[in-house]
Image (cartoon, helix red, strand yellow):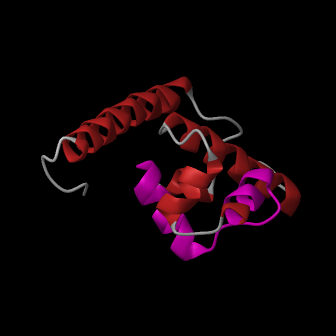
Amino acid sequence: MPVADDEETYKKRIGTVITELRLGRGYERQTEFATAMHVDVSTIGRWERGVTLPNAFYIRELARLLEVDYAILIDPPDRLSEDVLAVSRVAGATVRREVVKRVSRRRRGGGKLS
């Protein structure tokens, strides 16, 4: 049976996974991601640096927003597999295209941004 990480190593692993998934989903800046998560940007920074851990509520929100299973956030791998990153990049590109379409429609007066 593998030896469990110490707390600092565990925090760093979770931080790395959050960063990789955030970038893969197209959130280039922590500020954009913080807005989507409804937290202060400093909270995202602390999670990604491994200073603090997200609580259960935020783990749920992270999983929902990043479209991953909770297990990746609770027991993160040392690095995400290329398969997970590839899926994340494709989903992120899709989200970005949809946002651009909605913003364009709104600017043309074609409806509300939802």
Q: Magenta region: which residues?
A: 43-67
Quadrant of the frame with the C terminus? bottom left
Q: Is residue 39 left or right of residue 66?
A: right
- Residue 14 image position (x, y, % from top left): 69, 52
The one of 7 and 53 positioned closer to us in this rendering: 53
The one of 34 and 103 positioned closer to us in this rendering: 103
Q: Residue at x 65, y 68 (%)?
A: 40
Q: Residue at x 25, y 54 (%)?
A: 113
Instruction: Spot the residue most to the front.
Output: 108
- Residue 57 image position (x, y, % from top left): 52, 75
- Residue 62 image position (x, y, % from top left): 51, 59
The one of 26 and 82 positioned closer to us in this rendering: 26
The one of 38 and 56 positioned closer to us in this rendering: 38
Q: Is residue 6 visible?
A: no
Q: What kind of secondary structure does the magenta stretch mostly adopt?
A: helix
The part of the image, by quadrant, that contains residue 81 is top right
Q: Residue at x 52, y 35 (%)?
A: 24
Q: Is residue 31 visible?
A: yes
Q: Is residue 46 magenta?
A: yes
Relative to 10, does residue 109 appear above or below in the rendering? above
- Residue 3 image position (x, y, % from top left): 82, 52
Instruction: Spot the residue most to the left.
Output: 110
Q: Is residue 25 magenta?
A: no
Q: Is residue 63 left or right of residue 5?
A: left
